[in-house]
Image (spheres, grey):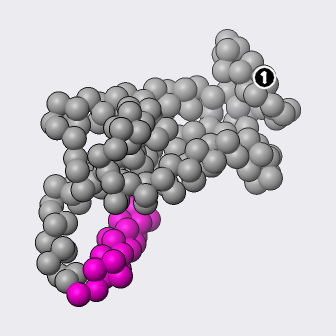
Amino acid sequence: MAGFVSILGCWLVFRVIFLLLVTPDMPFEILPNLHTIHLLHWTLFLLLALAFYGYIVVALGSMCNTQIDLIAFALPLFLIFGMSANVMFGLFENPSNLSASVLSFVPPFTSFFMIGRTGVLPPWPIYLTISLLLLVSVIGVRELGSMLFSRAILLEKKPRGIKDIARIVQSPE
């Protein structure tokens, strides 16, 4: 919980610093735009992002002997994570563009794109659809990760590729 609070605090501090640098003559007129709904929005999607990526990393970590193995397995995941986080900062200036609206429905990108769209939140039906889609994706990733973790944690011979991982997931217990 302390890690989550520190992440949220850093995001708020960076947002205030961003506002101070972009509009140095009137930053305090912009700061009231950070309403409670925006903070709740950030909290919801940040928690869902931590859960989504956390379950994947834990499942991959259960199959690895060393941190080097984990980095090799999780590199594609970290690439998606990094690209999403970088694009998110670009969305602060134009949060309602078409690509952000479409990629908000793709679960690996949803959390970051929705955080980037904080300035212009979608209508409630679309917002609830995106939230439920991400929540269902988190539950699905949790189930898949739990299955992979329970089978991989006791392996003596660790997998070396995607085919080995698929074989572990498909094998009966």
Which part of the image, by quadrant, shows the C terminus?
top right
Q: Is residue 54 part of the magenta span, yes or no? A: no
User: In the displayed structure, does residue 26 sit left or right of residue 151?
Assistant: left
Q: Is residue 139 visible?
A: no
Secondary element at tag 1: helix
Picture coordinates of residue 143 (x, y %)? 49, 27
Q: Residues within 10 Å of mark 1 (few under 14, many from 20)?
A: few
| Rendered image quadrant of residue 163 | top right
Picture coordinates of residue 37 (x, y %)? 16, 55
Write the residue at 71% across / 21% down: 166
Residue segment shown in magenta:
1-25
For the residue pair 135 and 117, the one nearer the viewer reads as 117
Position above or below: 135 against 33 = above
Q: Is residue 169 visible?
A: yes
For the residue pair 152 and 85, the one nearer the viewer reads as 85
Position above or below: 71 against 73 = below
Q: Is residue 17 part of the magenta span, yes or no? A: yes
Name the residue furthest bottom: 25
The count of marks equals 1
User: In the displayed structure, does residue 107 sit left or right of residue 121?
Assistant: right
For the residue pair 151 and 114, the one nearer the viewer reads as 114
Residue at mark 1: 163
Write the residue at 27% across / 54% down: 118
Which part of the image, by quadrant, shows the N terminus?
bottom left
Position above or below: 10 against 53 = below
Q: What amino acid type should be assigned to the residue bearing mark 1? A: Lys
Q: Magenta residues: mostly which secondary structure?
A: helix
Picture coordinates of residue 23 (x, y %)? 28, 80
